[in-house]
Every structure is written in structure tokens, then in C-alpha cells.
Amino acid sequence: MTLSAAISLAPFDSAWLAAVLVLSTPLLLASVGELVSERTGVLNVGLEGMMLAGTFSAYYVAYLTGSPVWALFGGIAGGLVFGLVMGGLAVQIGADQIVSGVGINLAAIGVTGFFFDEIFGNKPQTLVSTIGNVSIPGLSKIPVIGNAFFDRNPIVYLAFALVPAVWWLLFRSKWGLAIRAVGETPEAAEAAGISARRVRWLGALTAAGLAGLAGAYLVVVEVGIFKQEMTNGRGFLALVAVIFGRWRPGGVLIACVVLGGADALQLRLADDASVPRVVWAAVLLVVVIVALWMITRRRRRSKAMPLTAAVGILAAGLCVIAPHVALPNELWRSLPFILALIVLAGSATTARMPSKLGLEFRRGE
Amino acid sequence: MQDSSSTPQVTGAGVAESPALPRPGGEPMLELVEITKRFPGVLANDAISLRVDRGEILGLLGENGAGKSTLMNIVYGMQAPDSGEIRIGGEPVTIRSPQDAVALRVGMVHQHFMLVPDMTVAENVVLEPSRGPGRARLEEVGRELEEIGRRFELYVSPTAMVEDLSTGERQRVEILKVLYRDADILILDEPTSALTPQEWTEFAGFLRRMAEAGKAVIFITHKLDELFDLVDRCVVLRDGRVVDTVAIGDTDKRSLAKTMVGREVTLRAERPILAPGRPVLDVKGLRLGSGRHHEVDGISFEIREHEVFGIAGVSGNGQDELVEALVGLAQPTAGEISIDGEPLVQHAPRAFTAGGGALIPENRHADGVATELSLLDNLILKELDSSRFSRHGVLALDAAREHAEELVAAYDIRGPGVDAPIGQLSGGNQQKAVLARELSRDPRFVIAFQPTLGLDVGAMETVYRRLNERKSSGSAVLLVSYELDEILSMADRFAVMVDGRFLSVIAAADADTEVIGMLMGGEEAA
């Protein structure tokens, strides 16, 4: 019997940890790409659509080839198709980025739905083969976390490895300087001989490709099937993660893990009769961490402080009383989105936002 | 005259010979031969030739729109010339992009800072196109920058964020960018517009050191004082042509200004002496701000017809707030403003305009014009309420257009036409548009706040002439300026404003520059 089971930390056990990793991976892939894109000044609202295109094309490629690896490339290609549309509209012509993005979201729903009906409409649902887990020798034998962290599929490792890679790209490489300069002060980049348009194209395509990969992940790793609109808002969560992460790779990582963690939690709790005491304790723990962070960052007098205190007291009370609360399934399912909404309202700061995010740049103005 | 048949006389016509007034024994670093660049509707550069030698600081003088920036953008590879030749060290070269220019050791400091505020000094310096992601060698660059800084007495911490730097320090970063790339030819496009006098002195010293170190410097400006401070030789551009190349030692400001503008200019406006009429604007005990600190602290004055009243003083002594209170943008906490004896009840810009007030604001782009709107829209912006250009809320565009065309002709506003966004006009022409809109309404009084900020000599003269015209036709004029010369040449009476108060009201005839300077520094007159 493991240690976690002994003191009954369920639902926060090894299986939950594993689920956090698995569920944050698609968010992480999409939001890291979006981070690069937003750093170049391209706000890619079409992330959801690109992800959806990725799911469908990955499913179709897997269906045709039977190879989940090819399916991943298929997913990237599917995302890139809409990336080209985004780049063409927002970067090349200088159309409004938000309008272009919304258009892409709507188009992706229509296009994937149409092709799915055309190709698979009257066939029985086919399960495509998925990618299995790769256990890392040695590490996977660590108690509690070993199995959860080091016996996962390779895309999980890739997604988490992307975070330091993108950090290095943005803050230590010449390309990163160009990317950040274009997002902040495109005219300065142009004066240095950098083509702002080319950098923005690169940003838009990076976001699209990674969103496509994130979409493919849903098919090839998680479920093996395609459903209409199966991305189910994950693209929008990834957009929120970039804001929550304050446009920094480390921040985006934390945001994705928090959102993925909420998603994993709702999966575990949705069918429970009552909310276990340990969940309230976890909420209390999170509030304490947030409060400590605020205090160390000398933000004691922040307006959010009384609110944090109130939530903390409430959580402490619930932790002691542990009332019988049975929430409807639907409410649990929307937990990540409720969390995203709170994050957006709470961290609605543009302090670290790239100055030219969402704004068109034309040479010679 | 037969314009079409006459051949223009161009220096060194036809022969590819070193142009215009070479210094004896000079070693040419950069030569431009008959550079021509045409934009739709404008000949921006018309066969321009010039040269700059090793160790020389060459001035390039011209009004806004004379073609200075276009010429230098061509040298820096940001625009391609239609014809002409560029030679560097005697060799003809082709410069297609800024990278080409950098490879040829040409460096440029742009008129506006080309810095990324969110990045460090070192990051700004290494910013360049790169084929691969490649590691940015920030530590090494930092060390090199410190070395350059020591050599040229131009220190900025490589790890400082640009957004935390002062204007003068940012200027240094721009120079460091150029020096880091080993530029031998430095082009500086109006680099001083944002510098304080102290920073300018420092900057000029630095440029001299650069020249002594054997570099060639092209210094673009429209400020005459700076040229006399710094350069030996100066090329004057007008309407896209080189009109003269002068040795600074052989000329004076007046004749240089005449060469630049193309006609006689008065550097100091002639002040018409008129007998003042009835009082127009009467301010009593005006006070703004609350608690212990008052931005405007009990100011009283009166301006009469045919009178220009000046407010001198250093920036930030309450001038902004005073003007805001007068035009109705800010609510005074005490005091009274009367126009023609009628106390102003309602403090709102609309009441100010309706009462016959006109404003030439300090910040043209924020308060003077709506840059995205057309010249036409800007010209009628303040008359939307009148029945002149609208019927039941619908614009009478024909009448508006006719009115706009008249103003364009009367105020000599030059640009691509009344339908083009006003942001495309030069600063001087935008200011002319503001003058046209404000003064054509035959105002009772005019508030001019730093009306010549950033303007060249020709446009400055227009502003002074128009204000004096208003004075002659009976308006009361309030001139708020940080330029003492402007106040002395324009105002009949003026006050020195320090810390929200008027120290003393002086008649122009009694003005003593030294005493006023002391007053502006906050010392009471003995």
C-alpha cells in the first residue's frame, strides 16, 4: 500500500498527478506556441480553431496510415493550414487580428464538421491506434511520483521540454531578441534590418503548428476518436494561460498546470457524492501560498488581499466542517473555465503585455 | 520665364566629379553623386550631390520636408534612389538594405529613438537579423560596450533596461548601437530634438571626439544654433535640392536662415505697437489644486484688445494647469474668469469656444489635431455645432470642402490634399492647419501654448505673423512659452510664472534678460 493511500489523500493521489500531466500537455503545447506568437505581436484568437483542425487532420491521417506518429505530423499540418490563413489575413494584409481569429474559429468548426460528415458520415466510428507510454528507466521507479511523471507518452515530455527551450529562444537567442523587439517596437526592429512581417509570420505559424500538435495529441494520445468540436474550449484555455503566465514561459507552465490540475480534479470528483475534506484543505493551501507570495512581493496593500483572506477563512471553515456538498456534474465539468474566468478577472493586468500585441504594423509609418 | 526649356544648373553637371566645395586635402569618406528620388507627386531629392571627409562634421540643414531624411534613408539603404551614385572611400557602392549599410560601416541614428524599451541596453545593441536562432552573446557584448563607453566617454550600463533610462542616456544607447558595429560614417537625423541644453553640450562634445577619432559625421538639423556650435561646413537643402554649401565661419544665422527658407526671414518677429482697447479676458484669484499644494495659486491678470500677454517661466510651474483651467478642461477651486466682462459660469471647452476663445495647444498630436482624420475633418472640427457645415446633424460636405480649400490657400497648408489624413502632413503644416481652424473663426481671444514647439524657422515665422495679425485685428492674445526669446519678441506685457504664481508683471519695454532669468529661477526681484 502506498503512502498516499495510507493517509487518504485521494483525489490528490498518483493517478491525479498523472492526469494533471496528461491534461496540461495539450494546453501547454498550444499556449507555448501562442506565447511565441503574442511576443511577435500577433494575438491568435483562432487557437481553438487551429487545434480543432489539428484533431481532425490527425484523426484522418491516423485512419489512412494507421500510424499515430504520422498522425502527429498530420495534426501539425492541419493547424498550419489555418496558420497560413491567419498569417495571410493578419500579417500580410493587416486585417484585424481578433476578427481574423474569430473567423478561423468559426471556419474550423464548419470545415472539420463538413469533412467528418463527408468522409466518416456513414461509417461506424473507428478507433485509431494511439501512442503508448514510454517509461524512463530508473526515474519511473520513484515512489508516488515516478509512475505519474516518468511513465507517460513522449508528447508529455516534449511539451514540458518546450518550456525551457522557448525560454532560451525568447531570452537568450538572437531570434528571441528579434521576436520581442517586433512585439514591442517593430520600427526599431525594422531599423535594425529585421523584417517585422517575416517575424510575425513565424510567430503565427509557430502558434498554428503547435496548436495543431495539441489537437493531434487529443486524438492520438487521449481518446483515439474524433468528435465534432472535440477541443471543447481548450484553445481558449491556452489563450488564458498566456495571459495568466504574464507572457513568460515559466508563468505559462504554471498556468497550464493549474488549469490542467483543475481539469483532472473535476474528472475525479464529478461522480463523487460529496466533496472530500482534502479538497477544501487543498484550496486552503493554495490560498495560503498566494497570500505568502503577495506578502513577499510587497503587495500587502493590494486590493486582492481582503478577498484572498476571505476565501482563506471560508476554505478553513469548510475544511473543518466538511459539509456534504454534491455539485452537479456540469458544474464540475466547467471547473477549469470558472478558474480561467477568476484568473482573467484577478490578473487582468497588461503590465507585461507586448506593447504592439494585436496591432497591425506597416512599414514606413 | 521659359521653365521648360531652361537647363537647371547643377554642380558638376554630367561629370562624375567630386561635388561641392571639397576641403583641400580632405580624404572623402562618403560621396553622393546626383541622387534623385521621386515620390508620387513630389521630387524628394533632385540630383543631390555632397561629400563628407574623414574627421569632419558636416551639417545638413533644411526645413521639414526639404528632403534631408529621404536622402539619408537612401544612404542607409531604407529607400532605393531612382538614380545617382553613392561612393564610400572613393568606391561606388550599392546599398539595398540597412544590413548593406552596416557592412559598409555606415551607421544611422534616427530622429525618433529606435529602441525596444522592454529590453536591456546590450539586447538592444545586438538586435540584428540572423539566419539561425543563435545564442545572443550578451555578456561579451556587455564587456565590449563598456570598453567603447570608456573610450568615447559614453557610459551606459549594458544590463539596464532601456525603459528606465533618461532621454540623454537613450541617445547614448543609439550611438553605442552604431559604434558597436564599427561605423566610420555616422548619420544623425535630428538627434537633439528631445535633449535638454546640458545634454546637448555633452552630446556635441561627444560628436567632436568622434570626428577627432577619424570618423565622418553627417549632422541633420533645422536648428541654426546647433550648427554654429558644432560644424565647419554645412549643406543647405531646399525643395529637394542643394541650394548652397557654406563654410559656417563665412556666414551668419540670418543669411543661413534665408538660404534655408528661400526668402528673407525675421528671426525675431516685429512687434506691432498698438494702443490696447477694452479688457477681453479678466482672471481674478484663479486657484487650482487642493490641500496644501496648489498647481495654480491665486493668479490674476487682464488681457485687453490689441494686446499680447506673455507667460514666461520654466516648464512645470503650473502653466499646463492654468491653460487647462482657462479653456475649461480643469475645474478651478477658486477665482473667476470673465470674458468681455461676463463671468464664465460653466467650465467646459465648449463654453470657451462659444465665448470666442481659440486655443493653439502645446501638444499638437494629442490636443491640436486628430491625426487619423483628414485635413478637411480637422479644419471643421470645432464648427460642428454651427449651422454652417451641418443641417440637422448631417454634414454639409460641399460647404465644408469649400471652406477647407479656402483655408488651405489662405494659410498655405502644403500636403497631399484636404482628404488625406492630417498625420501625413509635416509638423509645420499641421500647425498651420491648427492656426487656420482656430484663427479663422475670428476669435475674441487666443491662447497660444508653446505655439512654435518643434517647428522650423519658416513655420515659426508664420505662427508669429498670424498671432500678430490677430492682435492687430483686435483679439487679445495669451502666449505661454518656455522660450524667453519668444516672449520677449512677441509680448507687450508678460509675467514670470514660478510655482503656480506670477512673480511680477513686466512691460516688454522694461525687460532685462538677466533679471528675468533670475526670476525664472525663482529669485524675487530686488
Image (spheres, rainbow, N blue to C red):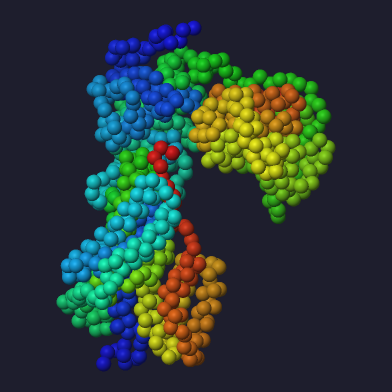
Q: Nearer the viewer, residue B356 or B181?
A: B356
Quarter of the image holding residue A145? bottom left
How far across and down, in percent of the image, does residue A67 sit?
17, 69
Quarter of the image holding residue B184? top left
- Relative vertical location of residue B477 with respect to residue A90 in this rendering, above or below: above
How far across and down, in percent of the image, does residue A302 sit?
54, 67
* Mark count: 0
How far across and down, in percent of the image, does residue A146 sit?
24, 80
Q: Is residue B288 visible?
A: no
Q: Nearer the viewer, residue B250 or B359?
A: B359
How far across and down, in percent of the image, does residue B213 sit?
32, 28
- Residue plotted at (34% across, 70% down): A228
- Residue plotted at (36% across, 14% down): B20
Q: Quadrant of the C terminus of chain A?
A: top left
- Relative vertical location of residue B16 with respect to residue A354 in this rendering, above or below: above
Q: Is residue B244 visible?
A: yes
Q: Nearer the viewer, residue B178 or B12?
A: B12
Tell me if A191 is positioned left or right of B239 in this view.
Answer: left
Q: Quadrant of the N terminus of chain A?
A: bottom left
Q: Furthest residue to the front? A: A122
Tell me if B379 is positioned left or right of A257 in this view.
Answer: right
